[in-house]
Image (cartoon, rainbow, N blue to C red):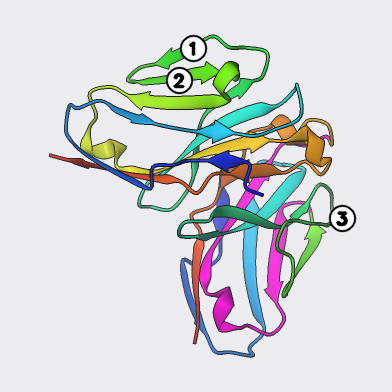
Amino acid sequence: AQKVTQAQTEISVVEKEDVTLDCVYETRDTTYYLFWYKQPPSGELVFLIRRNSFDEQNEISGRYSWNFQKSTSSFNFTITASQVVDSAVYFCALSDPSSNDYKLSFGAGTTVTVRA
Amino acid sequence: DVKVTQSSRYLVKRTGEKVFLECVQDMDHENMFWYRQDPGLGLRLIYFSYDVKMKEKGDIPEGYSVSREKKERFSLILESASTNQTSMYLCASSRGGSDLLRYEKLFFGSGTQLSVL
């Protein structure tokens, strides 16, 4: 069963608009890590953020911000004032200790297109 | 700059061929991974290795094997390529230690788009 759900397949916005990417996860464990990765057209996934299950503080890094809510098992990602360079596929991922084999479970990804 | 390098960006092979995908990392990482990426399915783990000559099956190991003779190199082998193995293949690495493995961020290569005709 898929453990990370990214319900939005594609999002298209005009430059300077904000865009929020949803991520919902499932795990039985109380200790876990969540990640976001960006995959630009070059193909190489780039790490954006890691958050552990005990730290529910929201985080802001430049135009990026993350909203982690354990009550709804969500770890949403917002790009503020989007730019064309933000066009990419974004993946949410979960490290699931309950699986006992050290795997990262990735969501299906959300393709973001920012138009000039 | 740290790097994970995959030998080919695009590869076209025929059904039944033996295919080697090579990956090299220069970060002295213990852990290396092979994923395949398909539209709508995200990334699925094929195999991973947490040490030289060690390998573990991921979610979809059927039809694949791997080799890790040296720490920096992790090869994915398609023994007899089939059309359903047409996909983007991504190699990744992370720092070592078995307990750290699950929490460490991954460094990815640029991928190999394999087409099996």
Q: Chain of mark 3?
A: B
Q: Point out which mark residue B54 bears.
A: 3
Q: Nearer the viewer, residue A65 or B72?
A: A65
Q: Are marks 3 and 1 in contact (CB under 8 Å)?
A: no
Q: Residue furthest front?
A: A72
Give residue A90's position: percent from left, percent from top.
43, 41
Name the kind of residue labelled 3 in the image: Met
> Can you identify the residue that label 1 sits on?
A58
Q: Are marks 1 and 2 in contact (CB under 8 Å)?
A: yes
Quarter of the image where one finds residue A103 = top right
Q: Which residues are magenta?
A: B71-97
Name the kind of residue labelled 2 in the image: Trp
> Can you identify the residue that label 2 sits on?
A66
Name the kind of residue labelled 1 in the image: Asn
Q: Chain of mark 2?
A: A
> Which-is-in-front pick, marks 2 and 3?
2
From what the image shows, is residue A64 above or below residue A3?
A: above
Q: Residue furthest left?
A: A116
